[in-house]
Image (cartoon, rainbow, N blue to C red):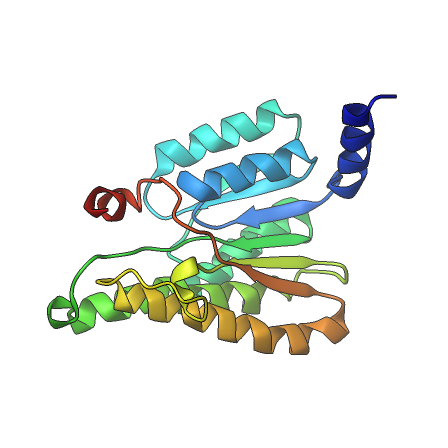
């Protein structure tokens, strides 16, 4: 057995998600669709959440099903508590339970501080931070011990010496995700639920097109 075979053998053991049920928010494109497909490749059934890109979400569902696992799309504005509750009811009805939640849905606007309106500030914080909180709140109701919650933050969240400028509201929302996760880890750990945050660097997606163009 060569080195590559050994590595693949252990990777298959470590990342075997056969039989697990996952929900990825903001999964119709970008990072979210990539996460959904990676989970499916590891054997998990995946619920694909989207806000407005129904056709793109169905394309992701199609690709997930091609990998031999179950999938469905669910339209939800994660900043709306009532819609979030309904989304998790649908997940429970179709999957029975939830083993993995990836809170990926998010938005960004680029504006200097004197151009950021209250409406824009609230929209970014509501989706990027409050939306993740709502999803965790509902997920733990249908998540057994051993469940995993992954919250997508950002390298712009603070504490790493990196600032971008013109995204103060986005940076604040992602910094809030880090603080929230640190607190929830203490709360959920005794229940057997693991929660973490990931802070990706700059990745070329539809959402970051404007930022990368400015660079």
Residue 144 x/y as whole percent? 74, 61
**Residue at point 76% right, 29% down?**
8
User: Quick check: 215 above or below 66?
Assistant: below
The quarter of the picture where residue 149 lies is bottom right
Horizontal side of residue 41 vs 81, given as left or right:
right
Residue 118 visible in image:
yes
The quadrant of the image that shows the N terminus is: top right
Question: x, y percentage for residue 170?
Answer: 32, 64
The answer to whether residue 179 is above or below residue 44 is below
Q: Would residue 175 appear left or right of 188 to someone viewing this image? A: left
Q: Is residue 28 visible?
A: no
x 45%, y 43%: residue: 31
Picture quadrant where residue 174 is located: bottom left
Q: Quadrant of residue 192?
A: bottom right
Q: Nearer the viewer, residue 99 or 173?
A: 173
Identified at 24% across, 69% down, the residue is 121
Q: Please tell me how many numbered marks the rendered image carries.
A: 0
Residue at the (29%, 56%) spot, across then down:
108
Residue 25, above or below 141: above
**Relative side of 104 to 97, left or right:** left
């Amino acid at each position: 057995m060569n080195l590559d075979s050994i590595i693949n053998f252990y990777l298959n053991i470590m990342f075997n998600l056969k039989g697990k049920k996952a929900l990825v928010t903001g999964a119709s494109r970008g990072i979210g669709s990539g996460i959904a497909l990676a989970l499916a490749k590891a054997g998990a059934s995946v619920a694909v959440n989207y806000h407005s890109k129904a056709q793109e979400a169905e394309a992701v569902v199609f690709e997930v099903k091609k990998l031999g696992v179950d999938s469905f799309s669910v339209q939800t504005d994660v900043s709306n508590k009532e819609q979030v509750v309904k989304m998790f009811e649908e997940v429970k009805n179709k999957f029975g339970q939830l083993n993995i939640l990836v809170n990926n849905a998010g938005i960004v606007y680029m504006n200097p501080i004197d151009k950021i309106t209250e409406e824009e500030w609230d929209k970014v914080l509501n989706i990027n931070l409050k939306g993740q909180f709502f999803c965790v709140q509902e997920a733990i109701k249908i998540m057994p011990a051993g469940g995993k919650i992954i919250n997508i933050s950002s390298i712009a969240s603070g504490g790493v010496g990196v600032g971008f400028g013109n995204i103060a509201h986005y940076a604040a929302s992602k910094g809030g995700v880090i603080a929230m996760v640190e607190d929830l880890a203490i709360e959920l750990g005794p229940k057997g639920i693991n929660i973490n945050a990931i802070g990706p660097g700059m990745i070329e997606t539809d959402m970051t097109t404007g930022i990368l163009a400015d660079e």
